[in-house]
Image (spheres, grey):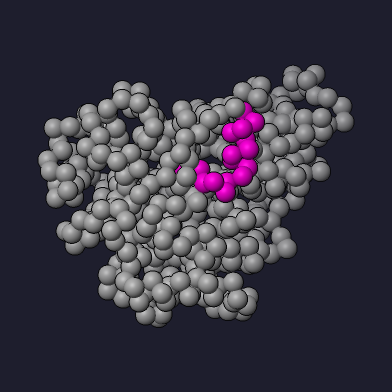
Amino acid sequence: MTTRRSFIKQGLLAAGGLMIPSSSFANILISGKKDVIIIGAGFSGLAAANKLDPKKFNVTVLESKNSVGGRVFSHEMKNGLIIELGAEWVGNSHERLLQLCDDFKLKLDDNQMSTHLLYKNVYSPAKTWDFSESWSKKYKSLLENYSHLKEKDKTILDQMDWWRYLVNNGCKDRDLDLHELLDSTDFGESIRQVSANSALGEYAENITPESIKNGTQNQMDQKIIGGNRSLAKKIEEKLKGKVFLNHTVTRIEQGKKVKVFCANGKVFEADKIICTLPTFALKNIDWKPGLPQKKIDAINALQYARINKHAMLFDKRFWKSEDFDMITDQLPHYFYHATQKQGGTAGVLISYSIGDKAAVIANQNNETNFKSVQETLRPIFGDVSSNLLQQENYYWGNDDRSKGAYALYGPGQADLMGILQEPFDNIHFAGEHLSENWQGFMEGAIESGELVAEEIK
C-alpha cells in the first residue's frame, strides 16, 4: 500500500469499556471486562472504540466538544449544500475508511479534480500545462530511484528540506515555483518546511507529475454523501451512549488504575487509556506522574499545518466544469469546487491557503478576503461579485486543540512519530499524527486508532 510519510515509518522507535464517573454507576460494570477510556471522539478515537471487542471491554469515549468528528468539520451552507471545512478527501486506497462507509451503508460520490493553472497572470486550462520537458524527465528518474535508496541515504535526505533537494537536483524558475504551489497544498506549509525524504517518499510511492496535473492523486477521489461527519455520527450511534460530549480532560493520574479528571467535575476510572488528542491538546493535560521528557520534547517539536478554508457560495457555477480546481500564485492560493454532484445551480468554491498565506487571510474580514479572490478570478471569469451569496471562513491555525489542520513532520524529525507513539504505562496514543501509512488523512486517523485498539489486552 502507498504511504504518505514513508520514512517516518523507518524512524519509529521500538516503540476497558464504560467508564464510571462515580460509584453509583458501578452496577453497570460487567465482571471480567476491562475498562478502557478513549480520550477524543475524532475519527481515531471513534475507530478505536468501534474496534474494541464489546465482549472483552467496557468502553467510554470522552470528548471536549459538543459534537463528534474532531477535525472532520462538515458544514451546511444556508441553501443546504454541504461542504467540508476540515478533513475532506477520501482516496481510492483508503481501505479502512471505505470499509467503514460500507459497514454503515454510507454512499460516496466521485470527487476527482482537473487542475487549471493561473501563474504570473497567465491562465492555462486543465491538461494544457506541465513542468518543463527536461525537469519532468529528471523528476521522473528521481521518483523511480527512490525505491533503490538505502536507509542511510533516506536518513541523509531527512536532514534536508524539500525545496533544497529540488534546487540541488536542478529544479529552478517556473518548475520550482510550480512545486512550491502544488506540493505545499499537500503538506499545508511551504516546501521549505518539509523533510525532503518525507516528500520524495510520498510522491515516489503515491503521486506522479502526471497525476498531479490530471487530478488523479489517489488521495482526492471521493467524498461521503451528506458530509464526512456522517461516518462519525454513525459510529457514535453504534456506541449507544458511551460517548460523553463536553467532557474536557484536565488531569490523568496513574496508579493501580488510571483516573481521568474532567473540567466539569466528573472523574472516570479505567484499566487502560487510549489518548487520541493532537499534541497541543495533549500538552494541556496535567499528567501524574509527568510524561517522560523525551515525549515532552517530541510534543514541543511537532508542528501542525496552518490551513485556511474560505468558502464562497455563488448563485451559479460560473466555473462550468464540475471537476474544476485551480492552483494560483496569488494569496487565495488554491481554488476547488466543493459541491460536486450536489444538485441545483448554486455552488461553492473554496479558497484553500497554507502557511503564511493562511495566517494573513485569517486576520482579514470576509469583505477584504473576497476582494483578493475577485481580483484573482477576474482575468478568467470577470466580475463574479454579483453572484456571491454567502461566505464562511475557518482557519485551523487558531484551533485551540490542534493549532493546525494536521501534523507536519519537518527535516530531521523522522524519529518523532516513534517517540509519540510509545505507550506511557497504561496509556496508549493514537491519532492522524501517528499513522505510519496515511498521516494527515482521515484514513490515517482510523488506521492509527484501530491499530492501538488491537494492542489493548
Task: Name the side, left or right, on which 380 lies relative to 177.
Answer: left
Q: Residue at x 56, y 29 (%)?
A: 106
Q: Is residue 456 visible?
A: yes
Q: Residue at x 62, y 77 (%)?
A: 150
Q: Residue at x 58, y 57 (%)?
A: 2
Q: Nearer the viewer, residue 299 or 450?
A: 450
* Vertical placement of residue 27 versus 311, above or below: above
Q: Nearer the viewer, residue 117 or 18?
A: 117
Q: Residue at x 30, y 35 (%)?
A: 348
Task: Name the side, left or right, on which 301 lies relative to 448.
Answer: left
User: At which x and y percent is residue 40?
Assistant: 58, 38
Q: Is residue 327 visible?
A: no
Q: Quadrant of residue 174?
A: bottom left
Q: Nearer the viewer, residue 421 or 442?
A: 442
User: At which x and y percent is residue 420?
Assistant: 62, 56
User: At which x and y percent is residue 295?
Assistant: 62, 59
The number of numbered discs placed on residues in the rendered structure image is 0
Where is the C terminus found, in terms of image quarters? top right
Task: Name the side, left or right, on which 162 lies relative to 13.
Answer: left
* Vertical placement of residue 431 versus 172, above or below: above
Task: Name the side, left or right, on which 271 lies relative to 66.
Answer: right
* Vertical placement of residue 100 versus 418, above or below: above
Where is the N terminus found, in terms of image quarters? bottom right
Q: Is residue 453 magenta?
A: no
Magenta-highlighted residues:
86-104
- Residue, far right: 32
Q: Is residue 94 magenta?
A: yes
